[in-house]
Image (tube, rainbow, N blue to C red):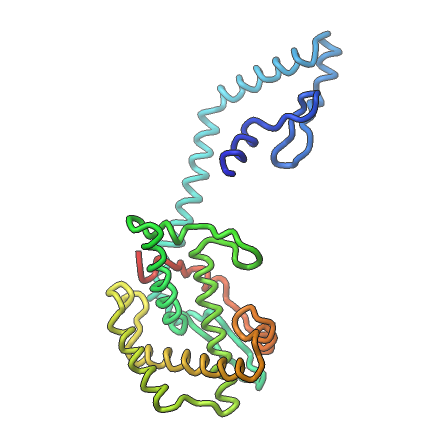
Amino acid sequence: MEKDSTEMIGKGKRTGATGGRIDPFTGEPITYHYLNTARARRGQTEEDAITRARKRRRGMLKKYRPMIMSLLFVALAGILLSRGTKNAGFAYREHLGDVAVTMAAPDGGRVSLDLKDLAYYVWKIERDGDVRARAYDPKDPKVYWNLFLNDEGDQSGYMSDLGREAVVDYAVRDTIYVLEAERNGFALTQEQERDAVLEADRYFLDQSEKAKEALQLSRDELIDSVKKETLARQYMLYLYDNGQKEIDVGGAEYETLKSAYGVTVEEEIVKGIRIGYVTIN
């Protein structure tokens, strides 16, 4: 598809018997408004006028090509530099206290999640994604995170961006369900708590040196995160068993509940998270 689009932009598209060309950007026929005047003045055909116009255009391009190329190079370099600075300059560990999400609970209480609260989800999504990335391209796993997923609805986008959205979605979802569980008197059993601690310990040992440095997650913080995730999951199972089926991210019942919490995402903070490059690559 990309090759066809390039050809169309470079050559235009001929339609009909007149040989008219379509502007690939507007979809409208390209018209040469100067032709009638030029032909009347010089007694030439439209073909002669087009030929002369093309020669003038080639001459101008030849004359100004060095300047045009210089301007394009400067513009491109500026774009790449700004992107590189933005992505490479955002050190997660230096922004752990930045608030990423705020919520206004129905009971009037306010809840905020900073990047430290999102760190557990960053680690999990990168860990799981890295398995798929290495299966996709063992020699260069970074390729996976730069893939563009063309799907329906909200599931279109680059894998890295979709991963970032998932981090926020899951952190918000678990926070809401923990609050709902506590409000309704739910708590983990001793067995569930023990299992959560064992799972957190395994996660703590599984962290790479880069993950430890980037996320600064202590053992106690990991235990707290896993316990909250477990409580949220248990409460979701309870809801499911009692007839509520659309309770995950995107589900109608969950989205209605989420709207009651007045969730606000601090985009300027969140967009600095480049999933696929925080704890891996």
Q: Relative to residue 279, is residue 37 depicted above or below?
A: above
Q: Relative to residue 190, is residue 51 depicted above or below?
A: above
Q: In the rendered picture of this protein, how many numbered marks are placed on residues? A: 0
x 37%, y 49%: residue: 143
x 42%, y 60%: residue: 272
Q: Position of residue 81 (x, y in %)?
A: 39, 46
Q: Is residue 27 found left or right of 92 in the rendered image?
A: right
Q: Position of residue 113 (x, y in %)?
A: 45, 74
Q: Is residue 230 found left or right of 177 in the rendered image?
A: left
Q: If the image is split into quadrants, where does the C terminus sit?
A: bottom left
Q: Nearer the viewer, residue 71 or 109?
A: 109
Q: Position of residue 45 (x, y in %)?
A: 70, 10
Q: Position of residue 136 (x, y in %)?
A: 35, 52
Q: Relative to residue 168, is residue 7 depicted above or below?
A: above
Q: Nearer the viewer, residue 61 or 167?
A: 167
Q: To which quarter of the image does residue 97 belong?
A: bottom left
Residue sitting farthest toward the top: 43
